[in-house]
Amino acid sequence: MTPEDRIHALGIWRGSIEISPIKGGITNRNYLVSDAVARCVVRLGTDIPIHHISRQNELAASRAAHAAGLSPAVIHHSPGVLVLEYIEARALLSADIRAPDMLARVVALVRSCHHDIARHFRGPAMIFWVFHVIRDYAASLKEAGSAYLPLLAKLIDKADTLEEAAGPFEIAFGHNDLLAANFLDDGSRLWLIDWDYAGFNTPLFDLGGLASNNELPVVAERMMLEIYFGRPPTDDLIRRYAAMKCASLLRETLWSMISEIHSSIDFDYAAYTAENLRRFERAYQVFEQDQ
C-alpha cells in the first residue's frame, strides 16, 4: 500500500481529498491533505527503536503540547499515522532564529514547553538522556560494522567528559529536537511542532540544541541564556551549557551515522554526518579551551 493509499483509507475525510507531500522531513513522511472541510497534516511513521522513537509517546506529547497552547491539535491517530490540525504558517529558518527579536520569542516558547507541558502530559513518559542515547548509538554502530568504528572510542570518551561537566542537572519536559523548521510563525504567534523525541531532560540540552542547530553566535547564546533564566549567566552555568551544546552536536552526528545505515528517506546523511562531526569537534575544542 502506498502512502497515498494509506491516507485515503483513513476513513476520516469529507468528500474527495488532495494530497501533497511536505518536503524536508528527515525522520518521517509528512503530507498536506485537503478535503471538503479543512486541511490537515498527516505524519506517517512507525516506532523507530534504534532512534528511541515511540509513536505513543509522540502522540501523548503532541496532545499535551496542544493542551498547553503550544502546538496544533491532534485530529486523528492510528498505528503509524498521526493527523494534525494544519496551521497556516511558515517554518522558521536558522537565519530567522539568529535575529534578536525572533530569538527572544523562540526562547519564551521553549521556556513554556519546559514549564507547561508536563502539567498536561498523560500516561507513561520517556526520559531523553542524551548521554545514554550517544552510548546506545555507538553500540549499534559497532554491531552494524559501521565505517565510523575507528572514531567511536574517542567520541565516547568525550561524551563521558561532557556528562561529568554538565552537572548538576535540572529536569524539565523537553522537545529535544529544536531545528528551525520545528518552529512555525503564523504572523501573530509561534508554534512548536514535531514531538518525536520529546521527554524529560535537562533544559540545557534544548538550549544547547537550539544554539547548535541554528549556529547562534556567542553574543546570541549569552542573550538566550539570560532571557531563559531571567538573569546574566554565571560562569558555572556557561560551562554546563557549553557541555550540553557539545553533547547535542555529538548526538546529532551519531544520529546521522545511524541513519546512513537504517533510513530509507532520500537524504544525504553522509554529508550531514560530516558537517555535524566538524561542528562538534570545533565546539569541543572551544569547550576544552574554556575549562
Image (cartoon, rainbow, N blue to C red):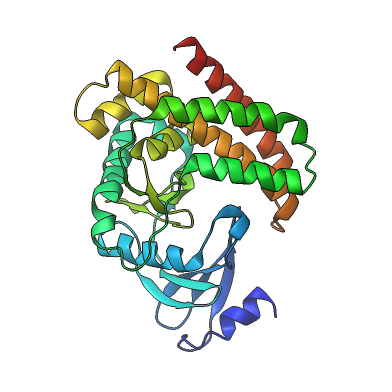
Vertical relation: 252 (above or below) 89:
above
- 143 with respect to 246 (left or right): right
Residue 75, above or below 232: below
Percent position of residue 45, x then y: 58, 67
Q: At which x and y percent is residue 263?
A: 70, 55
In the image, is 75 to the left or to the right of 31? left
Q: Residue furthest top?
A: 289
Residue nearest the observer in this picture, 28 or 145: 145
Tell me residue 265's x, y (percent).
Answer: 69, 57
Residue 168 in sight = yes
Above or below residue 32? Residue 227 is above
Total number of numbered discs in the rendering: 0
Q: Which quadrant of the structure image shows residue 239?
A: top left
Question: On the picture, is 64 further left or further right than 86?
Answer: left
| Residue beneath the point at 42% across and 57% down | 126
Q: Is residue 279 left or right of residue 147?
A: left
Closer to the camera in the image, 261 or 236: 236
The answer to whether 14 is drawn above or below residue 106 in the figure is below
Residue drawn at the location 51% of the way across and 14% of the way down: 288
Residue name at image x 41 percent, y 56 percent:
193
Q: Quadrant of residue 209?
A: top left
Q: Nearer the viewer, residue 233 or 105?
A: 233
In the rendered image, the quadrant that contains the C terminus is: top left
Residue 279 can be seen, yes or no:
no
Q: Quadrant of the N terminus?
A: bottom right
Residue 147 rendering spot, x and y as whole percentages? 80, 38
